Image: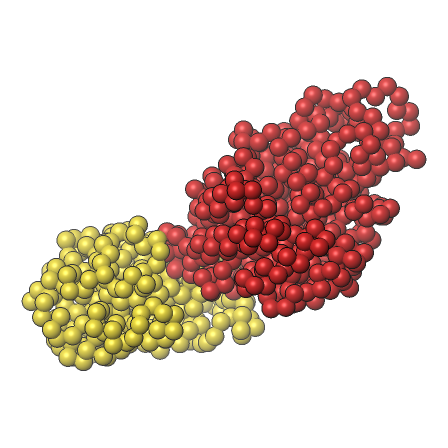
Amino acid sequence: MSKTLIRGARVLGGAPQEVLIENGVVTALGTVAEAGGATVIEAAGRILLPGLVDLHTHLREPGREDSETVRTGTRAAARGGYTAVHAMANTFPVADTAGVVEQVWRLGREAGYCDVQPVGAVTVGLEGKQLAELGAMHDSAAGVTVFSDDGKCVDDAVIMRRALEYVKAFDGVIAQHAQEPRLTEGAQMNEGTVSAELGLAGWPAVAEESVIARDVLLAAHVGSRVHICHLSTAGSVEIVRWAKSRGMPVTAEVTPHHLLLTDELVRSYDPVYKVNPPLRTEADVRALREALADGTIDVVATDHAPHPQEDKDCEWAAAAMGMLGLETALSVVQHAMVDTGLLDWAGVAERMSFRPARIGRLTGQGRPVAVGEPANLVLWDPDHRAPVEPAGFASRSRNTPYRGRELPGRVTHTLLRGRATVADGALTDAPADTPADGARA
Amino acid sequence: MKRHLISAADLTRDDAVLILDTAEELARLSDRPIKKLPTLRGRTVVTLFFEDSTRTRISFEAAAKRLSADVINFSAKGSSVSKGESLKDTAQTLEAMGADAVIIRHGASGAPYRLATSGWIDAAVINAGDGTHQHPTQALLDAFTVRRRLLGPDGGLGRDLSGRRITITGDILHSRVARSNVDLLSTLGAEVTLVGPPTLFPVGAEGWPCEISYDLDAVLPKSDAVMMLRVQRERMGGAFFPTEREYARRYGLDGARMARMPAHAVVMHPGPMNRGMEITAEVADSPRCTAVEQVTAGVSVRMAVLYLLLGGAQPPAGQTPAAEPRGARPRTEENH
């Protein structure tokens, strides 16, 4: 019987408390009198949050193990304070069958650093033409409920409608990568003053907004849930706000990088800033922060997108799109949202743990810090300050846009069902904790 | 002067005037029986062309050879990726062969900037056209040509283009020539107007240091120079304009339109021309058209750029160091 006592941590940023964990479950909270034999974590000054849940992670396995594997990606997740990640479907082969999603799910269990909840492709091969076997993926051991062709947009309105309707049978959700393909042919960066000057083909905001507008209307029409991936423009915020005000069944995510970085960085032509959707303007960043604060945007999702060095060490047009996110997400959120007064720590827990778990219908994750709940927890030192040093990353890749930038905070401990995946800031050795019933009840 | 020439926007007014004045000096060389200076003897200049552009390449090659540099031509047609070799490896290979300067033409905007700033190589980088971004020596040769025509070869020395009205017409969206010229000509004090159909302007051009017009006829009488950009026929596939005929009717320069220009105004074209599309043969062959002079100017201007970028860095013993304040004159060698 394992026992851990966390002393002096500020639960969700509140007053310091003691938390007792026995056999992976929180058994006492407040003042713990008797904790004989417990491993003690002194956590004065630290923030205790529920383990973070990422709705949007690219683990790259199977197929691109040169950039990330389930093991390296979940180690990166643990370092970032995550206890569950949703693994996107754009692997090789595509996660469009029960076999592939089960493989990814099993690899996650074997690694043991973080629950891996596979996302299934909406269409076969992400080609947007024929529905993948959504039901078979749901019924598999992986229990898929989130479906996405992320990386590509489900641009055919009929396919999108059918997918939304079909997943109602098992309370699934379609996570849409909103990008009108014709408006973004050859697009390289946000369309605006910077693209005009740099001579890089523009990626207009309307290419995202028009798809979101269509899809909230479709979701409302068929009465199914749609989730908008990596919303990036002020106009998208307005559409989602309007849809929510009408009670439409839409949720939305924003990435850490869209909360902080702008297209001005592209002036360097350094492809580490090349990402889909592209970095937008200062006005967009402001609108996204406000929308995350007021709940228009439900969650922060990393869109962690590892790429090997050779895919970034080249001219802009030839480079791959995407940037790392897992190991810096909470630092960026503290910097952009907490230190600016836009969000308190309870708000961070809501947007990075509770709500993403609810959207993904995970039952064993994103739970309150309370007696009887699974001890998926992260301890955060908000006063830590250091420049981001990618050499120390657990990810196999190094394509972080924050290299050398000073960001606040760091994870000191991550607990997955009571077992430390990160302790004193370092990954523990193969925690290999096999959940009794997986993340899902 | 900086160590590289990547964008016309990097040049100050004084930098630009120094290049134009140096080019005037060097242009005189072509009147001599021996058209060669020893300035870059022993230096190696590589032309690295990922896109076909025989005109630009031989212009740089002629410029480098007249300064006695060794020239290596590296043609890497197609993208580096389709070749399977990265830009980084190609550049490092060239430097390992001793390149002092790399003149690069690349289809990807920003490739020369990457080469100059990524730490991959130490050589000076000269942008010979990148994607739809910049083509600074084209802008310099255009400025050289227009200064000569409007102010005279001697009258122009030391002077910029203050108050001159220059109109650039055509496919602004896809044109590195337009971007470079807006930057350089405005730095030199000219009033620049861009003309074309709205579909061929980039979103975001509103902030550029120039006027934007969709009406060529309204702008022509107020122009001292009218530059016609090549319009690629394949743009029709992107629905940028309905037909070639309609484009030519609204934005092409013919004899009747040319007659609306002031008597002193010149017609410019960076070449190669689409006769019958953006310019009629009547205009192209008229004495007001500077297209051929622009080619000659290209060699002089590229000599000036090489001279100023490389000549001052490690002057061979007994050579005139370049990149001195204006007034420093290239030394000629009569019997080489």
Residue ID at (87%, 32%): A22
Q: How many numbered marks does the figure carry?
A: 0
Q: Which colour denotes chain A?
A: red
Q: Is residue B172 left or right of residue B264?
A: right
Task: Examine the rendering and report whether any part of residue B296 can be seen.
Answer: no
Vertical placement of residue A386 versus A125, above or below: above
Residue furthest out toward the left:
B263
Tell me the quarter of the image containing the C terminus of chain B. Answer: bottom left
Figure quadrant of the N terminus of chain B: bottom left
Image position of B318 (left or right of B297): right
* Residue A45, percent from left and from top: 69, 25
How is the protein colored in the picture?
Answer: by chain
Q: Position of residue A10 (x, y in %)?
A: 70, 25
Which residue is at the front of the view, B296 or A194? A194
- Front residue of B77/B211: it is B211
Residue A54 pos. (x, y %): 67, 46
Q: Colour of chain B?
A: yellow
Q: Place residue A204 in its image quadrant.
A: bottom left
